[in-house]
Image: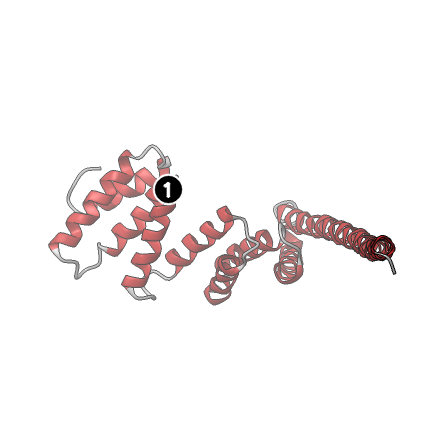
Amino acid sequence: MSDDLIKEVEEEQRLLRLRSMALRVGGVLVVLLVLAGVAGGVWGWQQHRLHTAQAVASDRYFEAMKLLGDLNALPSAESDARQKAEGIFSDLAQSAPQGVRSYAAMYLAELKEQDHDRSTALKLWQQVVDDRASERSLALMAQYRLLNARMGIAPRDELRRGYQALVQTGGSWVPLAKEGLAVLDLRDDAKPEERAEARRLLLEVQTSADSTDDLRRRAGLLLQTLGEAG
């Protein structure tokens, strides 16, 4: 077989291999496109389900809010309405999608706090803190409520770390957390340096632009316990 013929055969075989490879690659691309289309459809369906579930959960949330809002108008139905509202919030706090679940847990925690059911309120606040889907503002509020509710129960060092972490977040949490730190330093057996630190923190709360009027008033009252006008 001549060299030219050999080259011609080799070239024809090379072209056949290229066509075969192209067909295989084309098949893979078709499969990938189909899979992408299926995945996109599944994702869209899941998003639709999420939005539908959120809408249903939101309707139930506002139903519970309305029940509580109607208590003043229908005092005779207070017990039944409150019980039904708490039941709705409880269901939503456990099974609602993100965006509603934490709001329901926070509202239910406040109701339980009003009912003097501190242990359930603590669990609900902790749930919001631990839920990675919680909005940051809600998680911080839950953390703050946990710290305040555990004042006098939890070790002071643990509470101090919690309030200091809130100080690090900045904004309106700073004066609230400093108030908590000051209260920790105002116990009966506080050392002189701790009381001095409490005074410093309270003065900062009074002068902070992020403090509310109520917060400044509370700081003034605490300063009076230290023998200093606020």
Could you tell me which secondary element the residue under label 1 belongs to?
A: loop
On-image quarter of the C terminus = top left
6 or 22: nearer the eye? 6
- Label 1: which residue? 170
Q: Quadrant of residue 214?
A: top left
Compared with 213, 199 (above or below) is: below
11 or 123: nearer the eye? 11
On-image quarter of the N terminus = bottom right
In the shown orientation, is residue 86 left or right of residue 154? right
Give the image location of residue 103, x and y in percent. 58, 51
Give the image location of residue 92, x and y in percent. 65, 58
The image shows a total of numbered marks equal to 1
Question: Could you classify mark 1 by the number of other residues whose Cα lies within 10 Å: few (under 14), some (14-19), or many (20 or more)?
Answer: few
Amino acid under label 1? Gly
State whether residue 54 appears in this view: yes
45 or 60: nearer the eye? 45
Give the image location of residue 151, x and y in percent. 34, 60
Name the outermost residue toward the left.
192
Q: Quadrant of residue 215?
A: top left
Q: Which residue appears at 31% of the width and 38% of the height? A: 216
In the shown orientation, is residue 219 left or right of residue 199? right
Compared with 211, 136 (above or below) is: below
State whether residue 34 appears in this view: no
Q: Which residue appears at 46% of the width and 64% of the height? A: 118
Give the image location of residue 120, x and y in percent. 51, 65
Name the outermost residue toward the front.
2
In the shown orientation, is residue 196 left or right of residue 218? left
Colour pattern of the rendering: secondary structure
